[in-house]
Image: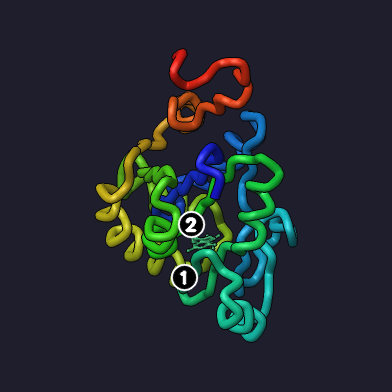
Amino acid sequence: MDLRRLLIVVSAPSGAGKTSLCEKVASSLPDLVHSVSYTTRSPRPDEQEGKDYYFIEEAEFLRMMERGDFAEWARVHGNLYGTSRLLLEKYFQDEKDVILDIDTQGAAQLRQTYPHGIFIYILPPSLEMLEARLRHRKTDPEEEIQRRLKKAKEEIKHYSGYQYVIVNDVFEKAVHQLASIIIAERCKSSRFDLSSFKELSLDEL
Ligand code: 5GP
């Protein structure tokens, strides 16, 4: 991987608002794409193939897994989710930074393979607020909401493995914080490309 490119990994308990945050930041900053994952979950009414996810059958997912097509994958709430290695490489070849919205198991895999990645954890303001958001979404049955809340309580404990934490209490504020982290990371001297100053040798700097 070209170290000048950013791999931004965002995790959060379900309902903390990370997908909306990632989409907003990807549409506001230049050269940043929100990676589209593969999943065996059924599409929700408002979801579109190729925009929200690539929806595939479990057999196809397992074939892709065996071929090593995934940069990371995980079973979350009984469904399989994975990030295509090829898609990631394509984004980097196109000189784009990539923001991934994935669970903590997937993030742990990427920490091994992409140690230069930027790992950001999004927290809801409180568990009560998280429950209210999951209910407000009106897309999941009660059983699913309870399952997601239980998982959220376990997931929240993983925040300390991430370099940055954002509390999503006010959406615009959280968007601003996420964008600021990405902008600051883009300015790091380690990502500066000296080749645009061809006439300078390193000794002269
Ligand atoms: P949802 O079904 O609500 O869209 O997503 C459920 C969980 O799966 C969320 O925590 C989401 O971040 C995670 N997820 C989505 N895509 C991927 C992926 O490609 N890999 C992993 N590991 N998790 C994913």
> Which of the 4 image quarters holds residue 55?
bottom right
Residue behind mark 2 = 102
Residue 176: percent from left, percent from top: 49, 26
Crowdedness of circle 2 by 10 Å Cα count: few (<14), some, many (20+)? many
Crowdedness of circle 1 by 10 Å Cα count: few (<14), some, many (20+)? some
Q: Amino acid at mark 2?
A: Ile
- Along the horizontal axis of the image, is 82 left or right of 31? left
Report if the CB atoms under discs 1 and 2 are less than 8 Å apart. yes
- Along the horizontal axis of the image, is 86 left or right of 81? right
Residue behind mark 1 = 74
Between 30 and 89, the one nearer to me in the picture: 89
Between 54 and 85, the one nearer to me in the picture: 85
Ligand 1 under 8 Å from disc 2 Cβ = yes
Q: Can you say whether 121 is above or below 58 in the image?
A: above
Ligand 1 under 8 Å from disc 1 Cβ = yes
Residue 138: percent from left, percent from top: 56, 57
**At x 63% / y 83%, what residue is drawn?**
63
